[in-house]
Image: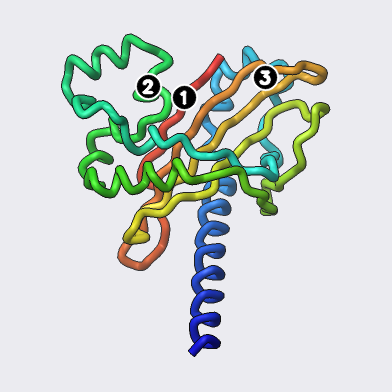
Amino acid sequence: MKHIITILFILLCVSAFCQQQEIYDLTFSDTSNFGVAVTGDFKTFCSSYKPFKKIVVLDTTLPWNPTTFWLDDPDFRLPEKIKEYRNDEHHPYNYSFLFKDTALDKLINDSEKIALSKKAAATTSQKIALRGANYQTTHYSDKLSGVYVVASEPIFSSDNHYAFINLYIVCRKKGDEYESASAIVNIVYRKNEYHIWQKIALESFLIL
């Protein structure tokens, strides 16, 4: 019995790992996901900007912000509250919260959003090793410059029907301590009837 449990555990781990790798590959092999980094404003503030030939991804993941999935304010859907949030550029409603997209909001119920927020709160930085035709991981150092990406680990819904990934795109000039420009990108995938992941939503926020 112990051997059966061990085998099942290994299979589940392998399956989870494969799913994560699939989401990473879908994300980084699709250069349209990085459109915010080729806009005029990003390029203006990023003197190190060069068109993506190979996407550089840090080998340590970014912990999730739980406000991506749920806001603690019980009145966050009221029009007056939304107006208040929009007047505060630092409120997570503006740069993090996914479900201000009403079409996306209707796809996932509130109980699942709260569950996803709890999963997000439990995430920590993890080591990753990725390599594809147009992307690869690299180790962070103070000498790292140019445009690079810090990715979260993918989060999956309880029914394994939806997958989410968060990207932090950074531009840093050589020798500078802080970035010149950055952007946040949130991407949502859904499994279709053939169990193939398809991108259904992308939100990006430019930070200058």
Residue at 54% of width from left, 48% of height from top? 153
Kind of element beneath mark 3? loop
Q: Is residue 26 visible?
A: yes
Query: In the rendering, at what x and y percent does residue 170 appear?
Result: 63, 27
Residue 94: which numbered mark, if any?
2
Q: Which residue is mark 1?
A: 205
- Left or right of 189, for residue 58: right
Q: Position of residue 207 (x, y in %)?
A: 53, 18
* In front of the other: 188 or 78: 78
The amino acid sitting under disc 2 is Asn
Q: Quadrant of residue 187?
A: top left
Left or right side of 32 for 58: right
Coordinates of residue 10 in the picture (x, y in percent): 56, 75
Instruction: Mark 3 or mark 2: name the one nearer the start of the chain.
Output: 2
Query: Which residue of the protein is positioned furthest toward the front in this rendering?
Result: 2
Residue at 17% over, 19% down? 79
Q: Mark 2 against mark 1, which lies toward the viewer? A: 2
Q: Position of residue 97 (x, y in %)?
A: 36, 31
Q: Amino acid at mark 3?
A: Glu
* Whole-number angstrom distance, CA of label 1 to CA of label 3: 15 Å
CA distance for labels 3 and 2:
21 Å
Tag 2 secondary structure: helix
Residue pointed to by mark 3: 179
Crowdedness of circle 1 by 10 Å Cα count: few (<14), some, many (20+)? some
Would residue 107 be seen by someone viewing this image from the given angle?
no
State which tag comes first along the sequence, 1 or 3.
3
Q: CA distance from mark 2 to mark 1?
A: 8 Å
Quarter of the image that includes the C terminus: top right
Q: Amino acid at mark 1?
A: Phe
Checking the image for residue 28, the label placed there is none
